[in-house]
Every structure is written in structure tokens, then in C-alpha cells.
Amino acid sequence: MPRSCLTPDELTTQTTKVRRRVTWELKDRRGGKSDPEWANRRRLLTGRERLSHKRFVKMWNAVVDEDPSGQIVSSYIAKEELRTLLSTVQVGGDPHLTRHRLHRLHRFLTWCINSNIAELLTLAKTVDAWWPEINAFVQTGITNARTEGYNRLVKTVKRSACGFRNRENSARRIRFHCTRAQRSAIQTSS
């Protein structure tokens, strides 16, 4: 799955965007310590299975009481649906699981569309547009994350250099940054 299509942060980014927008609409200001939705921002980004029952109930009740529109809770549910969908990568390519995965995809897309929240509609469009790639990743577990990481390194080196006049120096510096981890592993094993 190309990292540019759906990053893990995009799941939490949509929830954060909804939380910030709703807070601004309700209070005409940014969230603060006294606001339950701001106080529970980390819990909103945490996976359901990592929250104790007590912490989950505390977060859920505080957000439901504070947001009469229910948009923050809807975004949390959409995030959890997508996390459940993507978690099937650990299981493999069983045909029964593929049908289950498609059912989960339909559930996620339906939830996002029915919520009529702009941020969730954007996320649903992204997932729908990139579904063949996402499904290939879920079935095979193969990703181009390493390639994207090296691409980011190359861009960072070029940006920090403010332009090279000498191509050899440019290539040498890029090679140096991209092989840093391998060099340190060789030095420690010797």
C-alpha cells in the first residue's frame, strides 16, 4: 500500500480535526484544560482495546455530554471501524476473511457517508479510491514504506543542502544519509 494514500496518522488526524472544529463551533475558541473533549484528546486517539473499561466510559460520557451533535463520537467510531478493517492484515488471505473484510469496508464507508461529517467523507473517499492498494497490502502484508522512507531522506538532504553545485557531492551526501543505519550495524557487530 503506498504510504501516501493512507498513513496511520490519517486515522487519528481526522478525529483530531473533527474534535477541533466542533470545539471551535461550540465555544468560539480552541479547546483548553477545562473542556472534556480536549482533556480526553489522547483517549480519543487511543485504540479501544488499549483503554480500560473505566477510562473508556469516562472518555465516552464526557465527550457525549459535551458534544450535542455527536460528531466527535462518530469520528471515533469511524476510526475504530477502519482500524478493525486494517487489523486483518495479521491474519492472512483466507477467503472467509476477505468476505468479512469487504463487509467491514462497507460498514466503514456507510458510517462515514451517513455521518455527513466533512472530515469523515474525505477519509471515506481516500479509502475508497485506494481500496485495491489497501486490499493488496492487507492480503500480502507487503508495503513500500521503506522506499517512501528513503525518498523522505533524499528530499530532506536536498532541502538542507540548499542546492548542490557538484553532482558527486550531492550523491555522496545522499548515500551517506541513506546507509547510516547499515553502517552503525556493521560497526557494532565487528
Image (tube, rainbow, N blue to C red):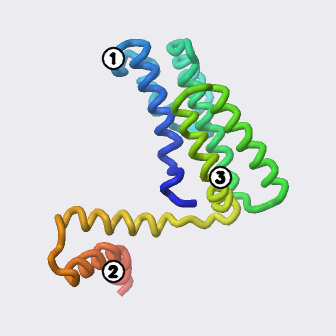
**Mark 3 or mark 2: which comes first in sequence?**
3
Cα gap from disc 3 to disc 2, whole angstroms: 38 Å
Q: Nearer the viewer, residue 78 or 66?
A: 78
Q: Residue at x 39, y 69 (%)?
A: 150
Q: Residue at x 56, y 33 (%)?
A: 120
Q: Nearer the viewer, residue 67 or 48?
A: 67
State the mark number for residue 131: 3
Is residue 177 among what the camera can see?
A: yes
SS state under label 1:
loop
In this rendering, the answer to whether 111 lies above or below 156 is above
Q: Residue at x 42, y 19 (%)?
A: 23
Tag nearer the camera, 1 or 3: 3
Of the residues shown, which amino acid type is indicated by label 1? Arg
SS state under label 2:
helix
Residue 189 position, x and y percent, is: 38, 83
Tag nearer the camera, 3 or 2: 3
- Tag 2 residue: 183
Q: Residues within 10 Å of mark 1 (few under 14, many from 20)?
A: few
Q: Quadrant of the C terminus?
A: bottom left
Q: Nearer the viewer, residue 46 or 141?
A: 141
In this rendering, the answer to whether 180 lies above or below 91 is below
- Tag 1 residue: 29
Cα gap from disc 2 to disc 1, whole angstroms: 50 Å
In this rendering, the answer to whether 2 lies above or below 127 is below
Left/right of residue 174 with respect to residue 20 in the rendered view: left
Left/right of residue 151 with respect to residue 106 in the rendered view: left
